Image (spheres, grey):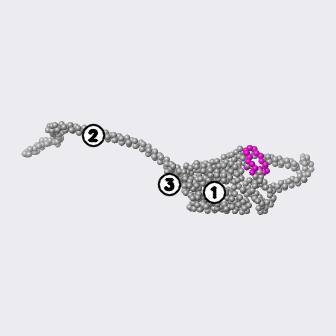
Amino acid sequence: MDYAEWQHPNHGNRIKIPPVSRIVSIILGILMLWTLLASVYTVPSDSVGVVLRFGRYVKEVQPGLRFKIPWGIDHVTILPVRRQLKQEYGFGTSGASNPSQHPLDLSREKRMVTGDLNAALVEWIVQYRIANPVNFLFKVRNAEITLRAVSESIMREVIGDRTVDEVLTIGRQEIESEALVKMQKLAAKYDVGVSIDQVQLKNVNPPEPVQESFNEVNQAQQEKEKLINDARREYNKSIPLAEGTKDQNIQEAEGYRLKRINEAQGDISRFNAVLAEYLKAPEVTKRRIYLETMQEVLPVIRSKTVIDENARSVLPLLQLGGEKGGKP
Amino acid sequence: MKTFMGIFGGFFAVGLLCLLACMYTVNEGEQVILTQFGKPIGKPVIEPGLKFKVPLIQMVNRMESRILEWDASPTDMPTKDKLYISVDTFARWRIVDPMQYFLRLRDERSAQSRLDDILGSETRTAVAKHELIEIIRSTKDRKPLKDESIVVTNQVVGVLVPIIKGRQAVEEEIFKAAAPKLGVFGVELLDVRFK
């Protein structure tokens, strides 16, 4: 069957099928297009492509438009070697493109025991890059899962060697740097092909039941400070006042003493002066004192009736002064 | 002419199929044992690349040559001071003797289950022989940093419990006990660690 025969349908009872050459050319065309499409690929700027030919590692290719042999001969794995990758432990932010970033079981992962047998909840991150794509792919299977195991193991080891005070407060930086050094060492031992750049502790907390008590301790400490300050203020306010009052009282008492002493001394000298005068003429003075005293005394007493011892009748006499009597 | 083309095409196609059936690739990170009717033939193929075999009667058995992980699920076990702790161990291993591995274990699933058995029981033994603190701490005479501003009121906090051996030594014990048992399977244990 050729092209001319196919062009004339009423030329005998032949079945109308396209000629072989046309089918072949269509198939070849599709094949060539497919080959072309399958042999072109791009490597993004943050990555390199690792090329395997018949399963054997051939080369690494840099970013750009690249070609390979199709039909399953060349295989290219693209790895983001320049990107800073990270893994989160004990917590997870959603929407990460790196599947190993998020922990599988975060509540189990973050519970740790410290060297003085206390519990702590530790969250941390590890930042790393793929340093050696060949090791990363062909030396270790699941390099990133291995890295997770390494990181968790090391962090527990480091935390297990420290007191809870160090873990929660003062030893954070030391923990980070020691964990980093140990992780780098172990990653090198396993040949995982990653370089660990940073280990950073995030939230480090006491376990939930204890957290409340921690807050209470803090509150109590603040309360203590406040009470001390209050007391100090009260002290400052009242003590100087009392000191002032004390001084004032002392001054007053001192003044009073002086006044009394001076008064008494004045009295003494006056008395002495009077005494000296008395001593000069005791009779006159005696008389004068008698008169003066009588002057004072007589107006006060009632009328007195002096009766002769021979007198018989007292009654009339008594009646005489009856109205006046009784009153001074 | 047409029949010749047809015959040629047919032969070509069959030839191509035969050629394809003869070839196999060994990937980077893989090793292969050829079996003929179930019987291992020749040395294990370790080098990656394009390889040839007798079609149909020879089978390709692939296995890993990379370092593999073994990650136990966390298990509760008692320590010497009879405290129950949840222990999570992981180990690295690889197939060093593919033939032995192939004969004794055949595939990775059974290898993982042997590792579970052996490492699991060795871990229990080692943990039960030591007190809790030996598994937690690692450096013997580390002096903890102290915050001078905090007055120590109770002696439990802020003091590291003394240890005799430490974590690494216990890990080492598990490793030493388990490594020869795994050696007979053609498996080399590289490392055992607590998580």
Are the residues under badges 2 and 3 in a single subunit? no
- Looking at the rendered structure, the secondary structure element under dot 1 is strand
Quadrant position of the C terminus of chain A in the picture? top left
Q: Nearer the viewer, residue A303 or A65?
A: A65
Q: Mark 1 belongs to which amino acid? A: Arg
Assess whether mark 3 and mark 1 are in contact (beta carbons under 8 angstroms): no
The residue range painted magenta reads A57-77
Q: Mark 3 belongs to which amino acid? A: Asn
- Disc 2: which chain? A
Q: Residue furthest left?
A: A310
Q: Nearer the viewer, residue A182 or B17?
A: A182
Going by the image, does A195 lie left or right of B153? Answer: right
Res. A261 mark: 2
Q: Mark 2 belongs to which amino acid? A: Ile
Give the mark, 1 or 3, whose residue is nearer the N terminus: 3
- Residue at the spot x=75%, y=50% of the render? A58
Q: Which residue is mark 3?
A: B154
- Residue at the spot x=64%, y=47% of the render? A197
